[in-house]
Image: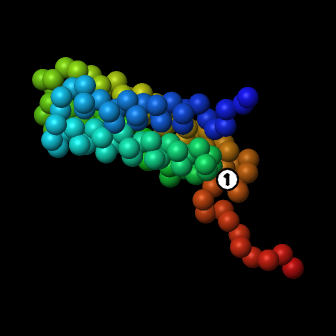
Amino acid sequence: MRVKGRWADWGAIALGLVVGLSWIAHGMYGFSGGLFFILGLGVILAATMSLTRPGALTTEMGVIAGGVLLFALPWLLGFTHIPGAALTAWIGGGAILILGVYGLTKARAARRRDPELAWGAHDNRVPE
């Protein structure tokens, strides 16, 4: 059986799930834990959309943005003194960022090969 989609998107989905649920293990309740949850869901959503539209660049940029925001979260919210949560944000954010950049290069190649794989490439005109 062949797995559909890019491995980078599946990896981003797995990391988004780990990040989205990590607030429970770190005991971060409140705003910081909510942001872990929301960022994890956002990465999962963007990566899932990348699986369905392999030529869409905006979804890969969403994965990259989620990775950058997650990486900067310990400094933005001031929880660098909690090692588990900070390491999860730095390692998870960096890995999501790398997977997003790799997916973006693959999406550009797919878009060049077949423009129909992108969102805005639909042509609804009836051929004459």
Residue 108 appears in the picture as rendered? no
Q: Is residue 33 above or below residue 59?
A: above
Q: Is residue 69 above or below residue 125?
A: above
Question: Residue 122: x, y in percent?
Answer: 68, 65
Residue drawn at the location 13% of the way across and 34% of the way down? 78
Identify which amino acid the numbered label 1 is placed on: Leu
Residue 16 shown left or right of residue 32 in the figure: right
Residue 1 shown left or right of residue 53 in the figure: right
Q: Nearer the viewer, residue 115 or 50?
A: 50
Kindly indicate the quadrant of the structure image that contains residue 74: top left
Residue 56 appears in the picture as rendered? yes
Residue drawn at the location 66% of the way across and 49% of the way down? 111
Residue at the limit of the structure toward the bottom, as seen here: 128
Residue drawn at the location 68% of the way across and 45% of the way down? 110
Question: Residue 12: x, y in percent?
Answer: 47, 34
Question: Residue 26: x, y in percent?
Answer: 21, 26
What colouring does the structure picture have? rainbow
Question: Residue 35: x, y in percent?
Answer: 25, 42
Q: Nearer the viewer, residue 8 or 17?
A: 17
Q: Secondary structure at mark 1?
A: helix
Task: Locate the N terminus and report the quarter of the image it occupies.
Answer: top right
Q: Residues within 10 Å of mark 1 (few under 14, many from 20)?
A: some
Which residue in the structure is indicated by mark 1? Answer: 117
Residue 35 shown left or right of residue 128 in the figure: left
* Numbered disc total: 1
Residue at the limit of the structure toward the top, as seen here: 83
Residue drawn at the location 23% of the way across and 43% of the way down? 34
Residue 38 shown left or right of residue 125 in the figure: left
Kindly indicate the quadrant of the structure image that contains residue 128: bottom right
Q: Nearer the viewer, residue 116 or 32?
A: 32
